[in-house]
Structure formats: structure tokens, C-alpha cells
Image: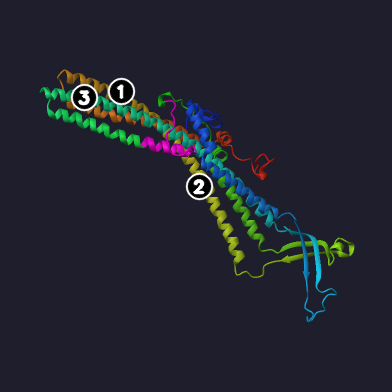
Amino acid sequence: DIPQAYRYSDAAEGKPDAADSEWWKQFKDPVLDEFIAEALANNMTVKIAAANVERASGILMTTRSVFFPQLSYSGSAERAQISKNNVTQPPTQNPYNNYQAAGGVSWEIDLWGRIRRLTESARASLYATMEARRGIVLSLTAEVASAYIQLRALDEQLVIARDTLKTYQESVRIFELQNKYGQVSGMTVQQARSQYETAASQIPQIEIQIAQTENALSILLGRNPGPVKRGLTLAELGMPPVPAGLPSDLLERRPDILQAEQNLIAANAQIGAAKAQFFPRISLTGAAGWSSEDLSNLFLGPSAAWNYAGTITGPIFTGGGLLGQFRQAEAQQKAALYAYRQAIQNAFADTENALISRKKLQEQLTADQKKVAAYKEYARLAGLQYNGGYTPYLTVLDAQQQLFPAELNAIQTSASTFISVVNLYKAMGGGWVAKADELTRALPAPEETKGQGMQKE
């Protein structure tokens, strides 16, 4: 059963045509646009998927070829001697020459539809491979956008960590001077120093994550691991609109659902092909040409030779082999059907998860930003009271210790909010996948699909 609407969707904010637009350009970051175009053109996984499409096209061509008469030719030149002591009478000339040139034709009459069903299965497998490639394009676009946004978040966290470290370093310097002249205790100095070291330990962790994210992004772009350039900050990024749509739209938008559908069609066709194995195969063969002992007379009328024949072959006893193939095909069809249903359910879950994540992350971001503002004010007031002698430094230390992780968390929540929109476009699919696919600079469409407008038969 297909739900009538999404549980966490907001029809008022949804934009109907958003799923058909190049949503990544709505971030308004030229660097991100450049990265996505580069990834779609150079990513190795996309190239592997394109090669798989070519392979599936070749399989279809091979399978379908049996449906047509098979033409062949042959020629030979021979000189031989037959034993004079042979039982049969040797030819007049011994040794003798023999020259032959002939053409042949063979054709299996597809009376029971075996070849048609195999062709149907191969064609569906080709379309499934095409949808698998589109699925990779979909995932790759989302992965590049998510990795880039995460990288910009880590960059901002590193700036915050370094600025905080400088502030703590100055506090340690001041308190060491004050301790030297007996204005503060050694415990206060150690408190400030522990705060400084805590911030210092965060910087290597963030730098590790930045390097790892850069390397991952480089691989997505089809490059060797290394640094990548930056564009806008998180605060400068635009927010793509929320795509609108019904759950039933996913059946036509998601490449993984379309792939599962074609796999089911292929499995159904395999049942027909397996059933046709129980019936006899009827074939017609023929040959025509010339045969002569003298090369100069090879193409003269008396040298002509021809034959034609019809054959019929069928199973009588196979020890259950054909029945086993039939049951195997039926089981494969059941598995494909369940996989199709599961793909639909997963698509619904992905979309619902993306919708609720986006909604709740926006609420969390608002709370985190308010929390950061409150901690900043708390730290400011604590500093004023400490300088006035009304509160111990422990209060200042507590305020600063609360502010630092709050700022890091707010940055991560901001990035997660952007990524949740990316995941929503990934979950809903749509016309944007075709636009992204145009950037892959893939090889021309296979011969089977040229001129057909990519219509599934």
C-alpha cells in the first residue's frame, strides 16, 4: 500500500518543481558547482557503471541475434592420396585435388517464444543497468555536496578552536604574571592551563578530520587524495527549497525502484524461457556452393552443390534438469518481486527520515544558536565579576568551558541542517538526476536504445 502523503511533510513550504532543478546550484557556491561537475565527469564509479551498461548492451545484442537467420561461408582447398589397397575404389586421379566454396544458413524457429523471452530478459537487464548507473549519479551528487558542506563545517570549527586557544593562552600568560606577584594562587594558574590544553587537544582532532574529508572528496572528484579549494562559508551558503511530491511519485523518480522493476521484468521473462525448454526446438539449415577437383571448373554449372534440412530436437528425460531450471527461474522471480517491494519501502523510509531530520535539525539549530549566545553573555558577565573581585576564576572557567563545545556543536548542527536537505533531494529523486547525468560525459547510448527515446518495451 502506498501512503497518501508523507508523515512529516509540510505542503505549504514544498516547491513542486524543485525536484527537477539543479538543486546544488541553490547553495550559490561556484566551488561546489565546479566540484559536482568534475565528479560527474571523472568519478571512477560512474565510469565503471557506464562500462556495465555497455556490457549489458552487448549481452542483449548477443541474445537477440539468435532470433535471426545465421549466415555463414566456408572455403577449402585440398590435395590428398587414397591408399590403393583400400577396400573402396580410389578416384581416377590419385593423388587428387578438391576445391570447395559454399555459403550456409541456419535458423531456429522460435515457435515457443524461448528466444523472445530471453531477449526480453536481456533488454530489461540492460534497462536495470542503466537505472543502476543513474542511481550512482544520484548518490555521487549527494555525497559530493555533503562532503563539501562537512569540510566547510570542519574549517569553521578549526577557526573557532584556534581563536579559543589564543584566548586561553593569553589568560594563562596573565595569570602566570599575577601568580608571580602573589595576586592569584597557583591553583588558578593550573585551572587556566588545563583549559588551554583541553582546547589545544581539539585542534589535531579537527585537522585529522579535515584531511580525511579532503581525501574522501578528492576520490569522489576522480583525483588522487590531496587538498581541495574552498568557497563560501556555511553562513554564506544559500538553502535549496524543499521539493514537494507525493509518495507515489517515488515510483517514477527513484532510480533504485526503477532498477528493481526492470530486474523483476527480467526475472519474469526468464520463467517463460525456462518453460520453453520443455518443448522441442525446430531448426532449418541449408547450404549451397561449388565443389570441384579442378580449380578452373569450380564455378561452372556441374560443380554446383546444395542441401537443405529441417531438424527437431526435444527432451525426453533430463533427470529433473529442466524442472530444476524452471523452479530456479520461479524462485528468482519471487526474490525480484520482494526486492522491488523492499526498494519501495526503503524509498518511503528514506524520504520520511530526511523530512523529519530537516525539520528537527532546524529546531535544534535555533536552540544551539540561542545557547551559544547565552554562554557568550555568561562568559562576559563572569569575566566582569571576576575582574571586580565578586566571583572566583572557577566561574569564568566554567563559562568558557561551556561556550567552546557549544560553538563547535552549533557549527556541526548548521552543517547537518544543510546536509539534511541534500539527503531529502537524494531520497526523493526526480528530474534533477537526468540533468546531473548530462554532466557525466558518458558514451553514446547503446544501439538497442537509439531512436527509441529510451522507452521501455
User: What amino acid type is highlighted by mark number 2?
Assistant: Gln
What's drawn in magenta, residue-wise? Answer: 209-232
Measuring from the top left, give residue 31's x and y in whole percent: 48, 28
N-terminal label among 2 and 3: 3
Measuring from the top left, give residue 127's x and y in whole percent: 61, 45
N-terminal label among 3 and 1: 3
Quick one: 37 or 100, which is closer to the camera?
A: 100
Mark 1: few/some/many CA within 10 Å (<14, 14-19, 20+)? some
State yes or no: residue 228 in magenta.
yes
Closer to the eye: label 2 or 3: 3
Q: Which residue is mark 3?
A: 171
Measuring from the top left, give residue 151's x and y in whole percent: 40, 33
User: What amino acid type is highlighted by mark number 3?
Assistant: Ser
Q: Which residue is mark 2?
A: 342
Closer to the eye: label 3 or 1: 3
Q: Is residue 389 above or below residue 212?
A: above
Query: Who's the residue at 52% across and 28% down the image?
Result: 15
Alpha carbon separation for disc pair 2 and 1:
46 Å
